[in-house]
Amino acid sequence: MDRVRTVNRLIFLFSVLATGAVAGAFVWLLLFLINTGISFIWDRVPTYLGSLYPVIACVVGGVVIGLFLKRYGPYPEDMRTVMATVKRDGRYGYDKLGRMSVGAILPLVFGGSIGPEAGLVGVIAAICTWVGDRLKRFGNDFRELSEIGVYAALSAIFTAPLYGFAEGVGGRRVEGGDVPQLSKIMRIVVYVAAIAGAMLTFLTLSHHIGGGLSLPRYTDIGYGADEFIWLIPMALVGALAGWLFCVLDVLFAVVSDRMTDRPVLKATLAGLLLGSCGMFLPFTMFAGEVQAEELNEMWMTMSVTILFLTGFVKITVTALCVNMGWRGGHFFPVIFSGISIGYGMSMILGVDPVFCVCAVTAATVGASMRKPLAAVLILFLCFPFHSVLILAVGAVIGAYLPLPRSIRDRMHNSDAE
């Protein structure tokens, strides 16, 4: 019996490593397809059209997205819903895998100011559930593959293993008589194996073939009295941007609820507004990871007004998109908004730009997530470990900046659902 149990455990660990690799490979594949679609729509086709192209493309995209939603329903589901389902049920349905994949790709290739994480997590959870169902004859432990795959995918998407590890190991286990109850040590081993498989596969494919995500990596942060004097004021400005996202997210959700039976109109209207903003502020479109690299090269040629407008308008457009049919996440656009506003603050205050970007971005992400630890772990994607104090101060200020009670109550109700 012990020998059989040991063999099953070894098979389970191998399956976990393979599941992580599958998650990483599928994340890479979807991102590769998204980048290919963006290149075709935004690099090749515009040569035949004029300056109104952003509006034309986004309106066409809105119509396509709206028709897709009308035909197939609201896919993909947002990341909180997917993760809550996996934690509650120990699985995520894979019968709609095709439409989930298409629903994740469409808004991004048409220039939506959204992140890819929501669609990718749903697809990965479905694939990992399918794998677990195929292998459940080896034991109930395999039912944990859905949850494991989700956090492995998160680590691959953000290239931030600590975030996926902390969320996974600290996550609530599914309750039920036939659901496995892994020990804490075993869960740690399992998540390390899954995240290693996901990240190694994702990074290998990105390096040798291309694709993936490319948020900038900042290393040279200037520390001095001038910087720390302005740390809290800078964090408050960033927190205001994240606060604005939370408020607008709820307000646009209310508008969307009143237009529930008009998915085509909602998505087309969002496309019109997105394209109109993109004509005057091009960086307000797309997820923001590529645009952040471009902004790093040219921010000194931009005015303070344009930098601030870009950051705050992108916050607004992202809240609009995610609630009006352009379904996706908000992490990457919010990070970009923080970077843009941070550069604007550096111009105003005359202090180290990377310090400003770090403080403002941490506060913006912290305010939008309301989870300071998760915000810090995600932002290690962009900033070095020795910036942890700046990240922590910014994220805490952002997370605890009070929201109006009506907004807070609706957010809590949404999380509970």
Image: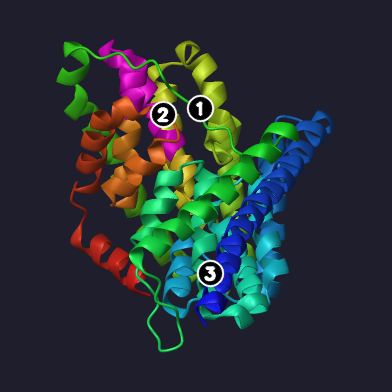
Q: Position of residue 365 (x, y in %)?
A: 35, 42
Give the extent of the magenta segment: 335-358
Give whichever of 137, 201 is nearer the camera: 137
User: Residue 279: image x %, image y %?
Assistant: 60, 32
Magenta run includes residue 336: yes
Image marks 2 and 3: residues in contact by CB distance under 8 Å? no
User: Mark 1 = which residue?
Assistant: 216
Give the foreground label among 2 and 3: 3
Among the 4 quarters of the image, the one containing residue 265? bottom right
Q: Say which element carries label 1.
A: loop
Residue name at image x 57 percent, y 44 percent: 199
Q: Earlier in the sequence, mark 2 or mark 3?
A: 3
Q: Mark 3, residues whose alpha carbon is within 10 Å: few (<14), some, or many (≥20)?
A: some
Name the quadrant of the C terminus: bottom left
- Figure disc tally: 3
Mark 2, residues whose alpha carbon is within 10 Å: few (<14), some, or many (≥20)? Answer: many
* Pointer 2 residue: 339
Q: Which mark is residue 9?
A: 3
Whether residue 392 is situated above or below residue 296 in the rendered picture: below
Of badges 2 and 1, nearer the viewer stands: 1
Mark 1 vs mark 3: give the one in front: 3
Q: Earlier in the sequence, mark 1 or mark 3?
A: 3
Farthest right residue? 48
User: How far separated are the C-alphas under marks 2 and 1?
Assistant: 10 Å
Q: Is residue 134 above or below residue 209?
A: below
Q: Main secondary structure of the magenta part?
A: helix
Question: Is 239 or 142 nearer to us in this picture?
Answer: 142
Colouring of the image: rainbow
Real-space CA distance between mark 2 and mark 3, rounded to the nearest whole angstrom: 45 Å
Residue that appears at 64% across and 48% down: 108
Q: Nearer the viewer, residue 85 or 234?
A: 85
